[in-house]
Amino acid sequence: MRTWGGKRLVIGAVSVLMILVAGSPAAVVADDDEAPVARVYVAAPPAPLNQTPEQAAAKSAGCVSCHSPVDAASMHASPAVVLGCVDCHGGDASAMAPAGASREAPEYSAVRDRAHVLPRYPGSWHFPSSANPERTYTLLNREAPEFIRFVNPGDYRVARQSCGNCHMELIERAERSLMATGAMFFGGASYNNGILPYKNYIIGEAYTPEGEPARLLSPGTPPGTVTLDEQRRGALPVLYPIPTWQVTPPGDIFRVFERGGRNIATQFPEIGLPSPTGQIQRLEEPGRPDFRQSSRGPGTGLRIAVPVLNIHKTRLNDPYTWFMGTNDQPGDYRSSGCTSCHVVYANDREPRHSLGYSQFGRDGQTATADPTINREESGHPIRHAFSRAIPTSQCMNCHMHQPNMFLNSYLGYTMWDYESDAPTMWPERQRYPTAEEIREVLDRNPEGAAPRGNWADLDFLRAVNDLNPTLRDTQFADYHGHGWNFRGVFKRDREGNLLDADGAIVSPDDPERWRREGEGQFVPPGTNPGRTVHMMDIHAEKGLQCADCHFSQDSHGSGLIMGEVAAAVEIGCKDCHGTSRTLPTLRTSGPAAPPEGTDLTLLRNSDGQRRFEWIERDNRRVLIQRSIVDPTLEWEVDLVRDAVDRDSPEFNPAAARAKLMSVSRPGQASFSWGPGVATTDLAHDDEEMACYSCHTSWTPSCGGCHLPVEANWQAESHRAEGGTTRNYATYNPQVARDDMFQLGRHGTARGGVIAPARSSSALVLSSTNINRERIYVQQPPISAVGFSSQAFAPHFPHTVRRTETKTCTDCHVSEAEDNNAIMAQLLMLGTNTVNFVGMHAWVGLESGIEAVRVTEWDEPQAVFGSYLQRYAYPDFFAQHVERNGRELINWTRGEAFDPEAGGSGDTRSVEEIAKTLQGTGGEARCLQLRGEY
């Protein structure tokens, strides 16, 4: 193995990954569509640590002859940073714009091409446009490092040269951060789905400057080792590249993945040298399945791990920061590497999500002073400048997806359920998209339902928030990462009624339920609009952005490789709010904090003001925090000790009772509470229970995501060397809920404290082979240790509220004995309310079993005759109601050739909807679905 730049980034790791490889790839990787242009590149020297202003000016002379005026001469706000353009970007600063030439003139283009570093793949970059192209993914791994540095000096492949003389430590940290490696997602997915047996994860994403998959080592002595203390706090010694899907054996126990009988031909086409025909030995082995996916071993043919295929080819929470954002819809505009965060793009018009950046819209358009940049073109940063004032809307590029913490909840949103305000979101006439139309939508939005909905149209999608005044059931966000829609979560009682801030029912016909008279489409920070209560985190409502709590280390990492987000956070609630006994120390105390904690009193914002400061106000000492994004915005921090102090104007009796309640002792007739209760006797001690166990207002949960792989779809891989191969799976959240609340215990890194838990990995898998046969349908995989793949994990929902918190009977038996189901759910014992029937309802009979078809196969998988089918499939709904009288019968629908689509065979295809009966020798008393096709 060889190291990259001596910085402990090692490529290869073939010997370790051999345990994952069985057989040869399932398909030959196709050539890229565009052939590279042969160029001779001149490597620019690293950006200097210091130089004179005159030297820097000489390195910008030719650049500013076109790009003038500029937003920031060095992209840095501080005038102490003295850099020329080519120090960071490379290129030729001696090339001067020809006097009087227009930008369309040949002589102008010639000088531009001499000044700029040119790409290997000009078509893919839409050269000479400087906008980020849509969905580049692995283009960065194929492109020349010199050109990558030219278009984005902050990309990790080149940041050592362009940024390393000043920021090398931060670069090395960022490369190992979870935002770059994705270790929690890749490791969790591989363990929960039976791919790898390691709960201490070993795979992640990293690349060399040449775009080769790389091995990452934690900076121990020697590199690749961690101490016992670091290990207990969640650090990992090493991460290996993610194996490709074509050679990864299935972890699933589905029978279709077994070898099959000797006489059974594979359902997968033989490519190259075929396997023996079996003419020599015709003896059949008993008990084998009657068809199979490969004549060879695991990891060949279709005997591959579908979740790994999904990781490589389906747009899940990728791209991580080794790649650019997809730059194709609001919420997806950003660059790669350091620039992913530190150069801000326009993604969201909501001020509470973006503060001052909201004025620039949500279409990735620029407000630069540079006259060469097209202001109407999407894919440009707002300004050509670095910033530490990073808005939440930039974070939501990645953190809007379940395995990336799903922080829509911070803003009061969750996944849309396809039913709320369905008449607005689905077309009046059922849509029958062609294969080409489906592919076009799925390239930017992996949910299989999207091609049938109105949001398949990008113009409709970007304007969904504009529809809010007309909606009856919910309100939608203004960002659409992955092309998804996010619905608002509002305060409700257990019967589902909307409530106002005082707990009174708000009529669904109240014209002011979403906006009071005079309130605009977007409201300023500190406002919760309308009579209802939008359940965004109280910090977000006040205008705090993610960067107001998560400072440098939380964003860049500590330098150690971490496998889970909870272990990588250094901030804690008590660091700013204190406890019932103590004032805040203003030193970080989370699992990733340094030994003495980071001193928050030393932090200063870009304008030089202290971020945290104790001041005198109204004859009392208060703690204020100043916004990192908006220098005019500051907040008085609520202190827990004030809430339990009877002499404080902030005293809250309910909070005092909850925080100072004693534990129950044997023989104790009643509970005691108050300042006299010893810390060791507190029922809700913060050393035993996370603050947000009670202060959480709601918890997002996902009870099932359907991944139906189709052999006849070809798709490009989003990782490593890329390439196009057959097989593709859509990604379909099916049970997204906001009304579930469960408690569990955190892992060792968090000290085992009690915290909210949620379902966050709950796959069901289906497969359609090359003959369009459904060989297994909606089967849950099995985890590496043989348990259910339905994984529950402790989780900080980021839905903290002051009033809409958990109360006693959310976690304790009610005196009225009316919360048994609530308690069963809380303790994860199950309530039988979140059931997944599937495409067939299986029925046991006196002398057989019957599979009754009850849903659509296509996404969304609406139940026949349901509200969702009525709007997503109006033609099919009408046929079920009018033709079949709502009865589940055997029938056939569709046409072989669609006359409304020019005789197409892929729009209204013939589908047989049948009930299947299998006889048995006696009464069927128990059914277990195990992937038996």
Image (cartoon, helix red, strand yellow):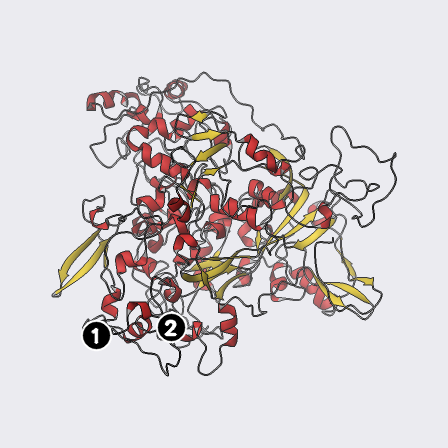
Specify few, some or many for label 2: CA neighbours under 10 Å numbering under 14, 14-19, or 20 or more. some
Q: Could you say which is closer to the camera, residue 887 or residue 308?
A: 308
Above/below status of 95 relative to 748: above
Between circles 2 and 1, the one closer to the viewer is 1
Which of the 4 image quarters holds residue 683? bottom left
The reply, left or right, for residue 736 in relation to residue 235 is right
Sequence-first disc among 2 and 1: 2
Quick one: SS at disc 1?
A: loop
* Residue 799 disc label: none
Expressed as whole percent of the image width and height from the top left, the position of residue 838 reads 66, 60
Q: Is residue 327 visible?
A: no
Which mark identifies residue 646?
1
At mark 2, the secondary structure is loop
Answer left or right for 718 relative to 396: right
- The crowding category of the residue bearing disc 1, from other C-alpha atoms within 10 Å (few below 14, some 14 to 19, many at least 20), is few
Q: Tell me residue 519's x, y (percent).
A: 33, 63
Q: Nearer the viewer, residue 530 or 689?
A: 689
Q: Amino acid at mark 1?
A: Arg
For the residues labelled 2 and 1, the Cα–Cα distance comes to 28 Å
Amino acid type for the residue under numbered disc 2:
Asp
Residue 371 position in % (x across, y down): 32, 32
Q: For the view shown, which residue lies furthest in the left direction? A: 619
Residue located at (74% from left, 70% from top): 885
Q: How many marks?
A: 2
Q: Position of residue 271 (x, y in %)?
A: 74, 31
Nearer to me, 500 or 358: 500
Left or right of residue 907: residue 137: left
Residue hosting label 2:
500
Q: Can you see residue 765?
A: yes
